[in-house]
């Protein structure tokens, strides 16, 4: 998927020291965005991502931050603009936390809060922090990484499913409010895309899942990164408030 690069501005990708975030950050940098590789832990991984971007001719900085803390998020956005020389005009909300399986009849309010912290509180803090720079720039892109669990409604992941639904509700509301500022807001909803944390998954489980996908394969991080890159580009300037499933058709029908 070719994606003409939006000129100027910085791309900030949370949870970018590994997994989907690392590949998304590398893709945006390859498209010409100075990129903030944000991590909470995993400094070595973040440095590897930055080194890879620089080796390929891109511009990037690794920045540590707790994206669930308001003071830290404000400092993060300021640091990204200072280190990379321009305001953040592309925000990719990717950071996540543990996603434990829980009997839905035993779910506690704290279980819900744990997920809402990452998928409602953190996106809200990040949106508010980048908004002044985007408005001053004359526009921007906010891209949230969601999930196709909404369609699958996995009961053992009830708090995660509920939080992901709430996260996309933010996308729809923000798209209406921020549209007049030239800011688009969209959600990319991957299916199961194996990354480092799935290293111990049995081959049988992967094969079983892939057999349910019309395209008969697992998703790749590059599939998600390409979709994010498109939504970050001028080619997607008239797309907002959408939730784009990238799962090979797994949830059709």
Image: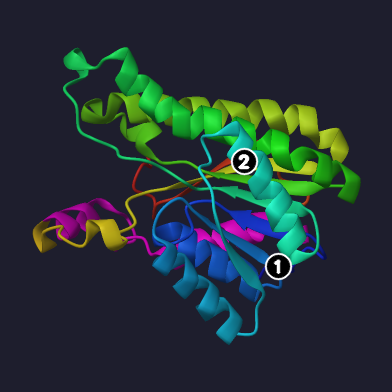
Q: Residue at x 67, y 58 (%)?
A: 11
* Left or right for 201, reference 67: left
Magenta portion: prevailing SS class: helix
Q: For residue 228: magenta?
A: yes
User: x, y percentage for residue 119?
Assistant: 48, 33
Residue identifier under label 2: 73
* Left or right for 113, reference 136: left
Q: Residue at x 33, y 24 (%)?
A: 159
**Residue 102 lies in what quarter of the image?**
top left
Q: Secondary structure at mark 1?
A: loop
Front-most of residues 171 and 239: 171
Q: Magenta residues, as a range?
A: 205-234
Q: Secondary structure at mark 2?
A: helix
* Left or right for 19, reference 127: left
User: x, y percentage for residue 12?
Assistant: 63, 55
Can residue 236 be seen by looking at this rendering? no
Q: Residue at x 76, y 59 (%)?
A: 82
């Amino acid at each position: 998927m070719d994606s003409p690069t939006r000129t100027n501005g910085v791309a900030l990708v949370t949870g970018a020291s590994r997994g989907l975030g690392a590949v998304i950050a590398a893709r945006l940098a390859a498209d010409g965005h100075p990129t903030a590789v944000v991590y909470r832990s995993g400094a070595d991984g973040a440095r590897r991502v930055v080194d890879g971007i620089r080796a390929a001719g891109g511009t990037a900085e690794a920045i540590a931050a707790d994206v669930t803390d308001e003071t830290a998020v404000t400092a993060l956005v300021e640091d990204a603009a200072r280190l990379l020389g321009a305001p953040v005009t592309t925000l990719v909300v990717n950071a996540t936390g543990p996603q434990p399986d829980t009997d839905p009849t035993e779910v506690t309010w704290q279980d819900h809060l744990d997920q809402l912290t990452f998928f409602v509180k953190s996106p809200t803090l990040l949106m508010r922090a980048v908004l002044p720079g985007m408005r001053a720039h004359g526009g921007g892109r906010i891209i949230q990484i969601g999930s196709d669990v909404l369609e699958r409604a996995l009961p053992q992941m009830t708090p995660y499913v509920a939080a992901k639904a709430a996260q996309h509700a933010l996308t729809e509301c923000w798209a209406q409010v921020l549209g007049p500022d030239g800011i688009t807001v969209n959600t990319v909803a991957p299916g199961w895309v194996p990354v480092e944390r799935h290293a111990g998954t049995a081959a049988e489980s992967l094969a079983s899942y892939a057999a349910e996908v019309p395209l008969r394969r697992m998703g790749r991080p590059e599939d998600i990164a390409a979709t994010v890159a498109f939504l970050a580009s001028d080619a997607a300037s008239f797309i907002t408030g959408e939730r784009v499933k990238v799962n090979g058709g797994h949830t059709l029908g």
